[in-house]
Image (cartoon, rainbow, N blue to C red):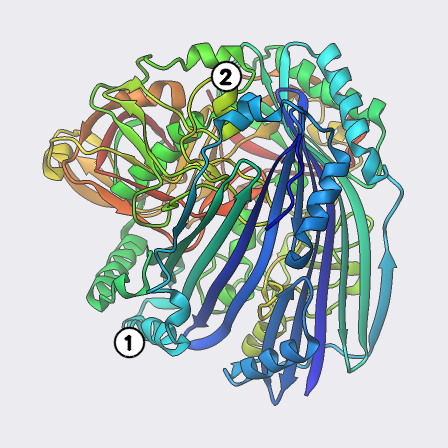
Amino acid sequence: MYKFKEGFYTDVRIEEAYETYISYTLGKLDDSRIRRYKAAFIRVFDGSLWYYASTSDTENIQNEIDKLYQAARPNPDILNHPIVSSFEVHQDKKLQFEENSVEKIPKIEKENLLKLFFPALNRQSDIKLLWKSIYIDARKKITLFSSKGTELVFDTQRAGYSLRLSFSADGKTFNDSFQFASNNFEDLPRDEEKLKEFIRKCEDFMMNAKPVTPGKYTVILSPLAAGVFAHESFGHKSESDFMVGDETMRKEWALGKKVGSEILSIVDSGLMPGSGFVPYDDEGTAAKETYLIKDGILTGRLHSASTAAALEEHVTGNARAVNFEYEPIVRMTTTYIKPGSKTFDELVSEVEDGFLIETIKHGSGLSIFTIAPSLAYRIRNGKIAEPVNISVISGSVFETLSEIDGLSDKLEILSFITGGCGKMEQFPLPVGFGGPYVRVRNMTVQ
Amino acid sequence: MIREYYRSRVIDTTINIVNSRIESIRNKNIEKTSLRVYDGGFIGVAGAIGKYSDEELFREAREALSKNIEYPAAHTSNLSMSMDCRKDIIPSEKLREETEALLAELRERQPDFIFSNKVGLTEVHSSLKNDDGLNLDYADRAIRAELVFKEKTSSSIFDGFLLINERKYDRKLVLEEFELFLNGYREKAGLPGKGKYPVIFVSEMAPIAKLVTDLNGEIFAEGGSIFSGKAGQKLFNDSFTFGQNLNPEIALNTPFFDAEGTVNKNYVFNLIDNGVLAAPYCDKKNAHKYGLTHTGSASAAYDGVPQPSLIRPYIKRTANSVKELLGGQPGILAWVYEGGDFTPQGDYAAPLQVGFLFDGEKIVGRLPEANISANIFNMFGDGYRGTAPNTFLPFSTFDFTVVEMDVSW
C-alpha cells in the first residue's frame, strides 16, 4: 500500500497485461509472440493542476508519487474540491476473466483456430488472393488505489481474429477483412462456410463494382456502419471534455434539446459484453448505461470526474486510457443505436434510388462525419442492385441525425480485435459498436 | 547464433491544455528492449518494457526460435554509425512556464478562440546492436504543439488545428504563425464555383494512403496492387518523386536506420523516381522472397519480428515556393480533411472541413466546407503542380505539395 500525503488527491493505476499476437501470410508464420508487462500510471491533483507520471518500474511507485508531490502544492481543502468530490469510491474485486483467461489457452489452440480457415483461404480460383490471418488476445488486470479510499482490482479481456483479404484479377483489386472478437476465446466463431460466402461476395464485388455519380442520396447503413455512424456522428460530440468552459457548446447541446429524428435513441454502455466492456473505468467509476439521445432528445453525455464536476453532472464510467502511458480521458465504451420496428426488407423496399453500405474501412467525426465504405450496393426501385465503389459518405453532424427515417427491428453489437477508436494521441482504444439497419436521407456520396 | 538488441527510450514531458489553460503535466520515461536471435535462417524475438533479466530475455528469444519463423535474409553486420541530433530547445522543467506564456499571449491576442490539447517535448534514444559488428545509435529531441482551436461562438467540438513540430522554438514566431491561421479562419473567403483548383497540402499529410498501401512489395508482387506489373513504367508526372526519407535533417525523432539496421544512401530511397515506378518498398524478407529491391523499409514492435513498412514517406521538392507552383492562380490550402479515402481504382474523395484561400503568399480567408476529389494517377500525374519548401510560415519547416483536384460546394 502506498503512502498518500494529505493535501492532495492521488491515484495509482497498475496495469498487468498478457497479450498474444500470431500472424500468418499465405499460411507461413510471420510473427508469434506473447507479451507480459506490469506498469503504472500515477496522478496527483492539488486543486489547480494534475501531475502525472507513467512508469514501468512498479517497485518504485512510491518514489514516483513523492516526486509528483514535490511538483504540486498542498491544498488543505482538496477533499472538498468539486472534481475530488465527483469520484466514486469502491472497494471491489471483479476478476471476471480469471477462470477463462486467454493466458490459460495453449498457444497451439490459438494457432489452430487460425489454421481452421486455411483450406477456405487456399481455394483454387482465377482470382488471386493474398491473405494474412491474425490472432490477437489481451487480458488486462487493473489495480487501482486512491487517496479517497478506492481499492479496486478488475480485469478486461478480448480475443479475436482478423483475416485480411487482398483480391486481384484482370487489373482489378479489392481489400476487405473478415474479423470477429469476443471476451472469451471459446466464443469465437469457427464457421468456415461463412468465410467462403464472404470470399465469394468480395470476388463478385471486385469484378462487378461500378463507379457512382457523386451527389446526395438515401443510404441504408448496416449494423456495423450504423454503429460507426453513431460513434462518429454523435458519440464524440457527447464526450464532455469538448464542452468544458465552452458556453456556446453548453447552450447548443443543452440536455432536453431535440437533436434527431423521433425514432432515434443512442446508448453508450460499458456493461455490454464485447470489446467495449469495462466494469470500472480508469479512475474507478463503475460502468453505467448512458442514454445519449432518447427518442430524438438529448438526454445525457459522457464524463470523467473532471468533466462531471465542470458541468455539474454525474460521472458515467467513461474515463479511459489506452494503456499505462496515458491519463484517462473521456471515451466511449460500446455505443449503439436502439432498434426500430421495420424489417430490413421494408427499409430497402421504400428506397427508390440509394445505397446500402455493408462493410466499412473507417470513420471520422468532427462537424462533418465520414464513413469510408468497402462493400456497398446500389438500391434501385426498392431492390438491392449492383455493387458500387464509393470513396466516402459524409454529412453534417448537426443535420444528419434528423434525416434518419427508418430503423430495422434487430440490434447487432459488433466487437473488433484490430483497430479501435482514436482521440488525439490515444489510439487504438477497444470500443464496441452496433445498431440495427439505419436509413438516412440526404447523405453526401462521393 | 547471432544476438541483436533493439532498444528505444522515450523521455517525454507533455502539457495538456483545457479551455486555453494548463490542466496537467505528464512525465514519461519508458525503455523498451527487443532481443532478436538469428539462427539457421530463422528468427526468434523477445521483448521487455523497463528492467529485464538478460538471461530470461535470451531464454525467451531462443524459445521463440523454435516457432520456425523464417528469416532467410542476412542480418545487418559490420556497420557502425552514431548520430546525436539533440539540440537545446527548452529545458523540460521550463516547458510549463513557456506554455503558460504562450497561452497567455494567445488568450490576449485571440480572445475569440478557445485552445486545447497538447504541447510536448520528446526525446528519443534508439539503438540497434548485434554481435556481428552492427552498432547504430541515434538520439533526438523535438518540441511539438498540437493545439486544437475553436471559435467561442462555434457549435463544433473544434474548428481546426495549430501544429508545430521542430528542433527549435521561438515563441514570437510560433505566435505569428498561429495567428496567420486564426486570422485567416476568421475571414470568410470564396471562389467562383465548383471546378478544378490547385489544392495545397502539407506534404507529409497529402493524400498518399493509396501509394503507401499499394507500393507494399508483398501486395505488389502478389498482384493486389494497382501498380502490380508496372515496375519501370512511367505512371506519374515527370517531376513526381516519392519514397522514404530518413535524413536526420528532416526526420524528427525517427532513427536514420530501419528496424533491420539498413541505412540507405543519403538516407533516402525513391520508390517513384521522376514519375517512373522504380520499386515497391520491402523489408529484407520480402525483398528476398519476391526478388525485389530491398529498400530499407522495416519497422518492428519492441517484441516483434520486423515487418515491411514505409517509415517516413516523402515527396521530393520540385520548386522554390508554393507561389511559383500556383503561377498566379489562387489555391486552396487544405487544412482539415479528415476521413477521406480511395476506391480500389484510386479515386480519392474527402470532405474539406477547413480550407483556406491562398494567394501564393498569404492566407486570404476561410472557404466554405467543400468536397475534394481526384484520381491518384491524375493527382500525381497531369494534375501534379509540384512540391516546395515553406516560404510563408514564419516558424515551421513544412514542405507543401500542390495538386489539381475537383472541388465542389
**With B111 as the anchor, is A394 left or right in this view?**
left
Instruction: Tell which subunit mark 1 falls on.
Output: A
Q: Position of residue B194 (x, y in %)?
A: 48, 21
Which quadrant of the figure has residue A101? bottom left
Secondary structure of the residue carrying numbered label 2: loop
The answer to whether any part of residue A111 appears in the image is yes
Q: Position of residue B139 (x, y in %)?
A: 81, 55
Q: What residue occupies the far right of the structure in this picture?
A: B88
Which quadrant of the figure has residue A237? top left
Residue under the image location 51 percent in, 71 percent down: A33
Query: Mark 2 = which residue?
Result: B193
Residue under the image location 62 percent in, 69 percent down: B47
Query: Mark 1 = which residue?
Result: A119
Q: Amino acid at mark 2?
A: Gly
Residue under the image location 36 percent in, 55 percent down: A176
**With B310 as the anchor, is A201 left or right in this view?**
left
